[in-house]
């Protein structure tokens, strides 16, 4: 992970945003609330957002016979803030963009869309932009749906936090090409309001569930650390050898503090405890992304 040093206000902005923190960093508690560049949460209001897609206003133009990969994103609005997810596939035990073969660049957008519709449910898939590196061309599509897709095990919707901070999704690494692409296009990782405020980007935690069906999975308050009372506990790392189902949780940390064993009087939205648990206090801070069976 990328490291921040002292006096860090752990909130999302671009790359403070994707919570560019290390569990080993020496983080001091900070009484300030959200940074002034963050967009406020608006309860029960459909938020407006801007996605900064590379070359979104430019006609598609890629070099002949350069290897092509497909980057598909979607913006979810079922969380405390809108957030962006990217579709990755597991090639040889690492998560990458989808590969796409074509012998010509003519009508390539339509061919790529047809290919993606064999993977994604029949919803809205539209061309959004493109990028080109020395060794690949990346065609970008926007996907729109009402719920998280139930895809085959080789595909997963990844968060920016996993791609950039963790550089892995569960036990599988994110490919260097994917990482490098986003490091070259960091604005694509965050959403903004029309007046250029940056929305907080969610972190990832895990929770155990006795339910088998995704739609029945949920988190519940429990008491693990008596000094804190009942809270929602999320594991910071994927648990091993669990006999229960594991939920993959996106959560909005807001202002995060390191729990020092005392009941802290400072204002905070979440805690980091013993590098093992994330604690959130409000149910609406989290979204269940699904079971973690794809990344075990």
Image (cartoon, rainbow, N blue to C red):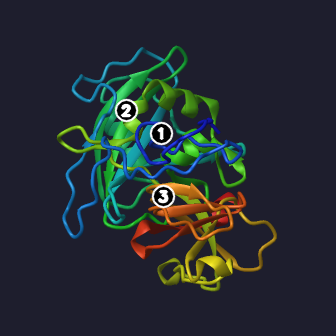
**Disc 3 to disc 1, how far (Cα)?**
12 Å
Task: Decide: few, some or many residues near mark 3? Use Cα within 10 Å; few <14, some 14-19, many ≥20.
Answer: many
Residue on which disc 1 sits: 16
Q: Position of residue 113 (x, y in %)?
A: 35, 43
Q: Earlier in the sequence, mark 1 or mark 2?
A: 1
Q: Is residue 288 left or right of residue 211?
A: left
Residue on which disc 2 sits: 187
**Disc 1 to disc 2, how far (Cα)?**
13 Å
Q: Secondary structure at mark 2?
A: helix
Q: Which of these two is toward me, 181 or 58?
A: 181
Q: Earlier in the sequence, mark 3 or mark 1?
A: 1
Q: Position of residue 272 (x, y in %)?
A: 62, 59
Q: Are marks 3 and 1 in contact (CB under 8 Å)?
A: no
Q: Nearer the viewer, mark 1 or mark 2?
A: 1
Q: Which of these two is toward me, 252 or 109?
A: 252
Q: Is residue 103 above or below residue 125?
A: above
Residue 25 visible in this rendered orientation of the protein: yes
Q: Position of residue 281 (x, y in %)?
A: 48, 73
Instruction: State the image quarter where residue 148 is shown.
Output: bottom left
Q: Are marks 1 and 2 in contact (CB under 8 Å)?
A: no
Instruction: State the image quarter where residue 261 is shown.
Output: bottom right
**Disc 3 to disc 2, how far (Cα)?**
20 Å
Residue on which disc 3 sits: 253
Q: Is residue 35 left or right of residue 238?
A: left
Q: Quadrant of the N terminus?
A: top right
Task: Decide: few, some or many residues near mark 2? Use Cα within 10 Å; few <14, some 14-19, many ≥20.
Answer: some
Q: Residue at x 41, y 50 (%)?
A: 32
Q: Identify the disc placed on residue 176.
A: none
Q: Which of these two is toward me, 146 or 11?
A: 11
Q: Residue lying farthest right?
A: 241
Q: Residue at x 55, y 27 (%)?
A: 180
Residue 151 visible in this rendered orientation of the protein: no
């Amino acid at each position: 992970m990328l490291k921040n040093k002292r006096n860090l206000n752990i909130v999302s902005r671009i790359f403070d945003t994707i919570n560019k923190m290390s569990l080993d960093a020496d983080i001091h508690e900070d009484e300030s609330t959200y940074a002034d560049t963050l967009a406020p949460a608006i309860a029960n209001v459909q938020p407006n957002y801007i996605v900064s897609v590379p070359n979104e206003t430019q006609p598609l133009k890629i070099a002949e016979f350069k290897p092509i990969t497909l980057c598909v994103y979607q913006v979810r609005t079922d969380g405390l803030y809108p957030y962006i997810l990217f579709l990755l596939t597991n090639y040889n035990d690492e998560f990458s963009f989808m590969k796409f073969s074509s012998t010509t660049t003519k009508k390539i957008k339509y061919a790529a869309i047809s290919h993606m519709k064999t993977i994604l449910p029949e919803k809205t898939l539209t061309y959004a932009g493109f990028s080109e590196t020395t060794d690949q061309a990346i065609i970008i599509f926007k996907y729109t749906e009402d719920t998280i897709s139930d895809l085959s095990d080789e595909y997963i919707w990844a968060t920016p936090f996993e791609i950039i901070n963790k550089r892995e999704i569960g036990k599988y690494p994110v490919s260097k090409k994917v990482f490098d692409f986003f490091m070259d296009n960091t604005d694509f990782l965050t959403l903004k309001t029309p007046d250029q405020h940056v929305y907080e980007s969610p972190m990832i935690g895990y929770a155990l569930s006795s339910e088998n069906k995704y739609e029945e999975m949920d988190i519940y308050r429990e008491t693990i650390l008596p000094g804190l009372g009942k809270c929602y506990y999320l594991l910071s790392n994927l648990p091993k050898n669990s006999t229960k189902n594991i939920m993959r949780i996106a959560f909005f940390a807001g202002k995060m503090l390191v729990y020092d064993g005392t009941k802290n009087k400072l204002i905070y939205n979440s805690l980091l405890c013993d590098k093992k648990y994330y604690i959130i206090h409000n149910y609406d801070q989290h979204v269940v992304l699904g079971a973690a069976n794809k990344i075990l």
